[in-house]
Amino acid sequence: MTETLYPFLREGETDTESLIEQVRRSTAAKAMEVVELRARVVAAEEERLRACAAAMADRFARGGRLLAFGNGGSATDAQAVAGAFCAPAGGARPLPALSLTGDIAVITALSNDVGPDVVFSRQVAAFGRPCDIAVGLSTSGNSANLLRAFDTAAARGLLTVGLAGYDGGRMAELDSIEHLFVVPSPSVHRVQEVQTTLCHLLWELTVETLGRDMREESD
Amino acid sequence: MAIALESRTAPLRHLAEHAGDVARACHAMAVRFHGGGRLLVFGDGTSSSDAQHVAVEFVHPVIVGKRALPALALTADVSTMTGVAARDGFAEVYAHQIRHLAAPGDIALGLAADGDDAAVRRGLEQARGTGLLCVAMTAAHGPPPEAAHHVLTAAATDPRIVKEVHVTMYHVLWELVHVFLQQPGTLR
């Protein structure tokens, strides 16, 4: 990576201050790359984000819960999605959300006894009800355990929401993902950064829709 | 009405303008890793999942061929966390682990998307006292943690937008640490 991103660097030739200056510039460029990528994705996906949030609000209004899952860094992002909905900052109404990556006993039991491919699908089968929402996060879009979880979720009537990177990978080929958002970047890091914003926008739009529906009901 | 992104753009512009602070923090972290130090990461709420995200970035890099670096999230051991919280109060959960797990050559990274955070502040204080390099990722509101050698501020007050900036910050952090490590001449 250093060779491709920083072709001017060769071992032993660089003093500390000039290297700091070079990485300062590359960091500033990356920050602006996020701004550009995010604006492009949100502009392209705006209507679909609103439709997805409306469907999520409908599920929550019917007593549904959100189940989030992913691998590696996306596992922690799934936990952050659960936290953003269930314990929102700023006094918003908490919505029931659960990460399927948080219980190490369940994860290791399923991995050890059956295999890593079932760690989310088995939990979706155990927890998922038709009014619930399944949110799966991946950068490659190819994780076998996510593909299985989406199939299980769709078969049980859950609303399915997927976030992927690159070209969407195998997640883009599934019929079981109703709302798929693809961040078209070759960088895992930029993909995850824009996915974080998309999750927050889905939360904002869902809460907005629920608030509007409640006001209309009380009118 | 179109989704407005202005409130999310300004903090990234601010990050671009302060990229030198990120570069200097990464250089200092690379010096510690080069000397055998480990990274201990912590934060509350959605920053706790960021702490675990940082740890996995370093331990299992997404770029094939990058060496694994020792990093540990202090938010993952629920037994220790709840034990300390129940006995000594939640503010001590990270300080306690740093007291018993950290060595003076290590690095502490505290994330506080909510601005001021008592447990993160206490963790950094304990880390500073133990001799660790202390790095903090904070928000525009709340006092900057005095114990931190390097404070990286996300110029926003909405914790969700702060978190989004933190994600970019720690991705860059991982990448730049490796850039410096591949130039050992800069680590003396």
Image (cartoon, helix red, strand yellow):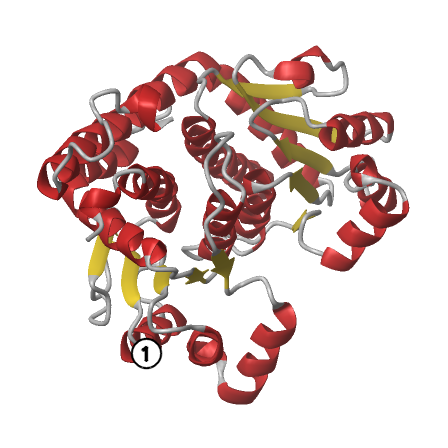
Instruction: Say whether residue A219 is visible.
Output: no
Vertically, is A91 above or below B16?
below
- How far from the left and from the top, in percent, is residue B179? 30, 37
- SS at circle 1: helix
Q: Position of residue B73 (x, y in %)?
A: 50, 59
Name the residue: 55% across, 82% down. Answer: B84
Residue B136, given in percent of the width and then of the height, sits at: 29, 59
Residue situated in front as seen by the camera: A25 or A151: A25
Which residue is located at x 36 percent, y 65 percent?
A: B106
Q: Residue at x 48, y 30 (%)?
A: B63
Instruction: Rate crowding at label 1 as few (under 14), some (14 to 19) or many (20 or more) other CA atoms within 10 Å.
Output: some
Report the residue marked by disc 1: B130
Q: Nearer the viewer, residue A12 or A49?
A: A12
The residue nearer to you, when weighing A140 against A20, is A20
Which residue type does callout 1 highlight? Thr
Q: Is residue A16 above or below residue A175?
A: below
Residue A26 percent across, percent down from the top left: 22, 28
- Residue at (59, 41) in percent of width and height: A72
